[in-house]
Image (cartoon, rainbow, N blue to C red):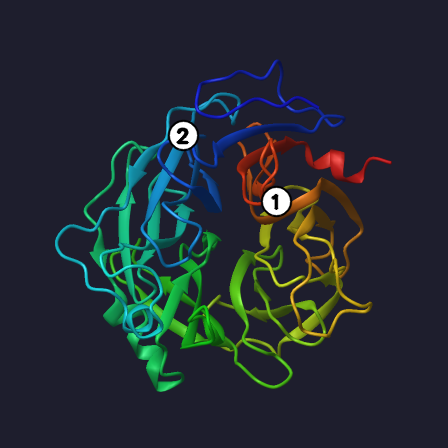
Amino acid sequence: MRTATALALFVLASPARAADLDKFDLFRADDGGYKMYRIPGVVVTKGGTVLAYCEARKTASDWATIDILMRRSTDHGKTWGEPRKIADVPGPKERSPVALAKKLGAKDDVTNNNPVMIADASGAVHFLFCLDYFRCFYCRSDDDGKTWTKPAEITATALDPFKKHIEWKAVATGPGHGIQLKSGRLVVPVWLSLGTGGSGHGDSVSATIYSDDAGKTWKPGEVAIPNTKEWASPNECCVAELSDGNVMLNARSPSKANRRLVTVSKDGATKWSEPKFDDALPDPVCMGSLLAVPGPKPVLLFSNPDNLDKAGVKQPPVPGTGRDRKNVTVRLSTDDGKTWTAKRTIESGFSAYSDLARAKDGTVLLFYERVGEKGGNYGRLTVARFATEWLTEK
């Protein structure tokens, strides 16, 4: 295994082979004027450019001043350009009523949160993000992320209609990446909450928003997973188009089952199946990622921290409570997620949010949070590179 540090260009000796797991750091805590880098996302454009993006936080808080930074790679993730700030909404910005009521962050903080990109088959890259967890914006790049259009607000058309189902006070896209269906439809997972709890993110539901006109307009889908006694506050969901054309939505939830919640739709927006817990996917209450890998033998990949232990508490921990974020693992399914036949650990120690993509040379990329080189959770955002075959090796 090889490790390289982040803020300079570096070169790996060779592409990932089946026997290799290569890791390198793209962002490190306290570098570049930011206390912490979190919430990773990664996509690969039609032209093969890899775009890795994240939240750059002035403090550790979800609600403090947060910028969105991005790095580009034009050689399948072997070398990377310098970080650059994207997604700046011009003009004055008011704080969310939830932030003000709960005194989350400072009055003048500007929270850009939950970046999500979609790599379009046309070559465009669509980019959505939120401002202070109550406004949503869209912009687009037609040159592999070199330049972006001015952010346009889509809150009124894409998210406000959900208020007939839930009087949401906080909302977020993704995080991670969205997808383009074979039909051309763009689909982005979202969660919407009543703004309860100390974090202001409590009592949530999971859903999607979509565009059928290449990102010009965005519409709400139906609520995919409601908030019930059994399916408690589903949030931070991910999506993938399965080999049969159905769309799977997979959500985290502080439910007593401590498992991922899964539902399926024919169009990625409506008529979601009854949500079910996947017994094979333990959920310590943390973000996960799905990636459909097409081909003669298509596979579905899933990543999240594979752990249900909690240090310092009597065993077993209370059902539905969060567990330690560690042991980020990638699983593989050959039957659209009905069963998971292989898995391998990427990071055995502290590791949390992650996002999956596939480079043009076939290498799988996992962009994830891990401990710092000298300790400290959320100390680094790291890209791991490996071949799909590596997951099935003994």
The residue carrying pointer 2 sits among few (fewer than 14), some (14 to 19) or many (20 or more) residues within 10 Å by Cα, namely: many
| Alpha-carbon span between mark 1 and mark 2 | 22 Å
- As rendered, which of 133 and 138 lies closer to the eye? 133
Figure check: 28 above or below 59: above
Residue at x 48% of width, y 21% of height: 79
Q: Which residue is mark 2?
A: 72
- Amino acid beneath label 1: Val
The residue carrying pointer 1 sits among few (fewer than 14), some (14 to 19) or many (20 or more) residues within 10 Å by Cα, namely: some
Name the quarter where the N terminus is drawn: top right
Q: Does 35 sit left or right of 273 as displayed?
A: left
> x%, y% of residue 62?
42, 57
Name the quarter where the C terminus is drawn: top right
Answer yes or no: is residue 270 visible. no
> x%, y% of residue 115?
39, 51
Residue at x 56% of width, y 35% of height: 382
Figure check: 269 above or below 368: below
- Amino acid beneath label 2: Arg
Q: Marks 1 and 2: which is nearer the front?
A: 2
Residue 293 image label: 1
Q: Residue furthest toward the top? A: 13
In what element is the residue under mark 2? strand
